[in-house]
Amino acid sequence: MTDRPNILFINTDQQSWNAISAYNNPYVHTPNMDRLHGNGVSFMKAYCSDPVCAPARSSWMTGRYASETGVPFNGGCLHAHLLDLGQILNSNGYRAFHCGK
């Protein structure tokens, strides 16, 4: 087995872009998030494709607009034929799982 980078994808709810001190916010102290930011990849120019939680998550999990995923609102179900990030990682030799919401 070849060495591969570990991947940890953290997706938080209702967090402003500058809600960690690594982005020069003097009002918060987030040493653990700052350490992750400093040793990993940070998406400085990312945006949310949908203002609602479940559609937004379906979008980043599949790489498609929420209108294409079957999750146009909270409570929708992802189209069964769509592959998500976890499935793609699993098919490429990673042990992947989703947890949380």
Image (cartoon, rainbow, N blue to C red):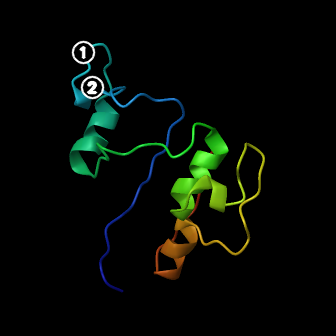
Image location of residue 15, percent across then percent down: 46, 29
Q: Which residue type carries mark 2?
A: Ser
Dividing the picture into quadrants, the one containing residue 17 is top left
Q: Secondary structure at mark 1?
A: loop
Q: Earlier in the sequence, mark 1 or mark 2?
A: 2
Q: Which mark is residue 58?
A: none
Q: With 8 as the anchor, is 85 left or right in this view?
A: right
Q: Which quadrant is the C terminus positioned in? A: top right
Q: In the rendered view, tell whether residue 69 sits above or below residue 14.
A: below
Q: Is residue 8 visible?
A: yes
Task: Determine crowd level at label 1: few under 14, some 14-19, many 20+ residues with C-alpha closer than 10 A.
Answer: few
Residue designated by label 1: 26
- Contact? badges 1 and 2 (CB < 8 Å): yes
Q: Nearer the viewer, residue 59 or 5?
A: 59
Q: In the rendered view, tell whether residue 11 sits above or below residue 33.
A: below
Image location of residue 88, percent across then percent down: 52, 74
Q: With 57 as the anchor, is 36 left or right in this view?
A: left
Residue designated by label 2: 21
Q: Which quadrant is the N terminus positioned in? A: bottom left
The residue lying at 39 percent from left, 61 percent from top is: 7
The residue lying at 58 percent from left, 46 percent from top is: 56
Dividing the picture into quadrants, the one containing residue 34 is top left
The residue lying at 33 percent from left, 35 percent from top is: 32
